[in-house]
Image: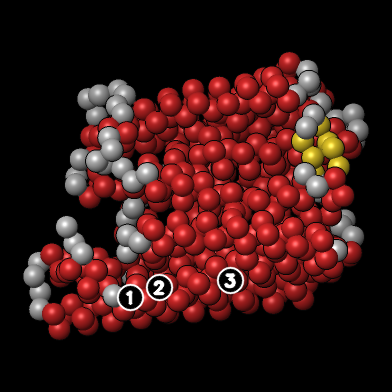
Amino acid sequence: MAGIGFELRKILSRDSYTATLRGYVYAGLISSGPWVLSIISVMLIGLLSVGVVGSQSLVRQFLVTVTYLMASSLIVTGGLQLFFTRFVSDQLFQKRTELILPNLLGILLLVTLGAGVLACAVLITLFDEPFVYRLLVLANFVVLCNLWLVIIFLSGMKAYNRILLIMAGGYSIMVASAFLLRHWGVDGLLLALLIGHGCLLFMFLFDIVRDYDSDRLIAFDFLDRNKVFLSLLLTGFCYNLGIWIDKLIFWFNPATSNQIVGPLRASMLYDLPIFLAYLAIIPGMAVFLVRIETDFAEWYERLFRAIRDGETLQHIGQLKNEMTLSIRQGLQEICKVQGLTVVLLLLFAPNLLDWLGMSRYYLPLFYVDLVGVSVQVVFMALLNVFFYLDKRTVVLQLCALFVVLNALLTLLSQYLGPSFFGYGFTVSLVCCVFVALVRLNRALDDLKYDTFMLNR
């Protein structure tokens, strides 16, 4: 959705260092803000609660519960996010904005019911924890599933100052609530998590309701088979499963994990380095969003406008070459910025772990994870280009390949021993990026043929 692209172009057009910095800060916070701020907030809650919530094991139960809530909600709604994003984008392109709000409320209703039933079934059959704990887990899961769907609208909204204030306010409320409720133990911390994410959900919903008018309350047009692409459901599911499957394998291998609360297990050896490494993606994500939503998106728009307007083949060819060049330059800039970030963190990693109170034995795994999450940014950029080119089958194949490779190579790394931990995640992404580059080169070579000969 082009809202963020227009706004970033407006900021960057001022051609000053301040404007450039502002543009990249906005892009970084919009692209990775919810994920990164949630990690930081949960870590702060854990630090504030040490020594107050009964014992350190209770704090660990909270952190592990939150991790499973994040993973499960993203996997469950990953397909719906892509599925509904495409529906909304099509309505915006056709200028049928009155359909957006009622369909958003419709999908939120279905997600609330579906997530509630699924969570109830799991909590009743697999957990024997106190009722309050299970009730709070249920509520948090439903809220998170809804929040991920609402967050897809952020890139289409232009009130970025308000968005950033809402993010900061929501997570500040979460941390403050945890500070006040920490004496209630794990239940108090989960209630604080629910309050924070609930505030974010309803504040973002308020902005969406204000931006998109409609005379209907709820609609289910997104379920019309002629308006949706079911392949996107599987693509979103595979992408999120691919991100989490190596963690799941480590969690449920008794040799690499411990039981924490109910059936939930965690791998203290594997989890800490990779979640810390994910904080390093902010610079790369900022560049990714700026380059994809400004240079590439602009040339893409010009190219297909020229095709629709019947411009000459020579002019269309020139625009296609410019779009290809913008992809190459964007990927190069992502690699440069993310590469510099990795080098700096490699240099300061020992001091960083000391400051965080983590053992230096984590360093080898942290180094591997740093490379892995950096490659993931490139992979995301390539997937986004394929989505622009409407290569849904290619994206599905790449995401399925990611799931299979990550699972198999992670199992192999466990067989080979601790020295190879993390390589499954990183090597699988490197392989996927290589395959994606080959497929992208082929797709760009065939772009004219696909556009003129296969268009129906």
Within-10-Å neighbours for mark 1: few <14, some 14–19, many 20+: some
- Label placed on residue 431: 3
Left/right of residue 368 with respect to residue 230 in the rendered view: right
Q: Which residue is mark 2?
A: 440
Q: CA distance from mark 2 to mark 1?
A: 6 Å
Pinpoint residue 268: horizontal percent, then vertical percent. 83, 50
- Give, as a three-letter code, the residue at label 1: Leu
Q: Earlier in the sequence, mark 1 or mark 3?
A: 3
Query: x, y percentage for residue 147?
Result: 51, 36
Numbered circles on residues, count: 3
The residue singled out by tag 1 in the image is: 444
Answer yes or no: do the residues labelled 2 and 1 have beta carbons within 8 Å?
A: yes
Q: Is residue 88 above or below residue 221?
A: below
Return the residue nearer the eye: 30 or 234.
234
Whether residue 365 sits left or right of residue 207 in the image: it is right
Tell me which residue sits at (42%, 79%) in the image.
328
Q: Quadrant of residue 169?
A: top right
Which of the two residues, 344 or 245, is positioned nearer the viewer here? 245
